[in-house]
Amino acid sequence: MSKKLSAKRSYLLRAYYDWISDNDLTPYLVVDANYYGTEVPEEYVQDGQIILNISMQATGDLLINDDAVSFNARFQGVTRHVHVPMGAAVAIYARENGEGVMFEPEDIYAELNREPENQPQSFEEAVDKPKAKKAKDNSFLRIVK
């Protein structure tokens, strides 16, 4: 019996955020603005993505957990709340030198990218949910030539 591994993205995002910040660089987060549950200023979205400065100086109440990145930030003088589900995080990099990581797709985030009534009840349910199997053809009639 193999144990299901947890998603890597939140761990990698936190690690790169810390590394970039510890080196006095500016962490930028690339976000898929079309991912379900993403709350970003729509007027700054280009080609379905937005790049956000998530440095401590640019954000208030920054929280990076297993589920999402959330914070308050000012956009042209107006304070806005930003919520980025972990599945919407595309990449994190340092503005000054481009060092960072682009995240690989993970099945769990595809599973969570849908309307609430179709979403699993929990992260664990999505991980443990078996893949939908093809309907088996149970007909007993066969074509004979």
Image (cartoon, grey):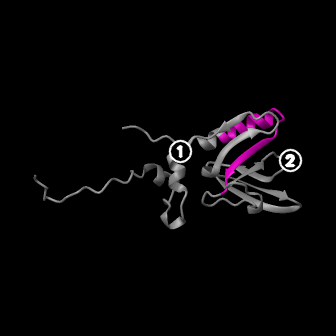
Q: Is residue 74 left or right of residue 64?
A: right
Residue 29 in the image: x percent, y percent? Answer: 72, 46
Does the magenta run of residues contain 30? yes
Q: Residue at x 63, y 44 (%)?
A: 10
- Secondary-structure class at tag 1: loop
Q: Which residue is mark 2?
A: 57
Crowdedness of circle 2 by 10 Å Cα count: few (<14), some, many (20+)?
Answer: few
Q: Is residue 3 left or right of residue 109?
A: left
Q: Is residue 81 left or right of residue 3?
A: right
Identify the residue under disc 1: 106
Q: Is residue 37 above or below residue 53?
A: below
- Residue extent of the magenta highlight: 13-33
Crowd tier of the residue under label 1, counting other residues whose Cα lies within 10 Å: few below 14, some 14–19, many 20 or above: few
* Vertical arrangement, residue 11 with respect to residue 69, above or below: above
Residue placed furthest toward the left? 145
**Is residue 67 in view from this perspective?**
no
Find residue 36 and report its horizontal and vertical position in percent: 60, 60
Between disc 1 and disc 2, the foreground one is 1
Dot placed on the residue nearer the N-terminal end, 1 or 2 = 2
> Vertically, is 21 above or below 132?
above
Q: Residue furthest front?
A: 145
Mark carried by residue 3: none
Q: Residue at x 82, y 46 (%)?
A: 56
**Image check: 55 left or right of 11?**
right
Q: Position of residue 102 (x, y in %)?
A: 65, 39
Residue depicted at x 32% and y 54%: 134
| Rendering coords of residue 21 (x, y %) | 79, 37
Mark 2 element type: loop
Query: What amino acid does circle 2 point to?
Result: Gln
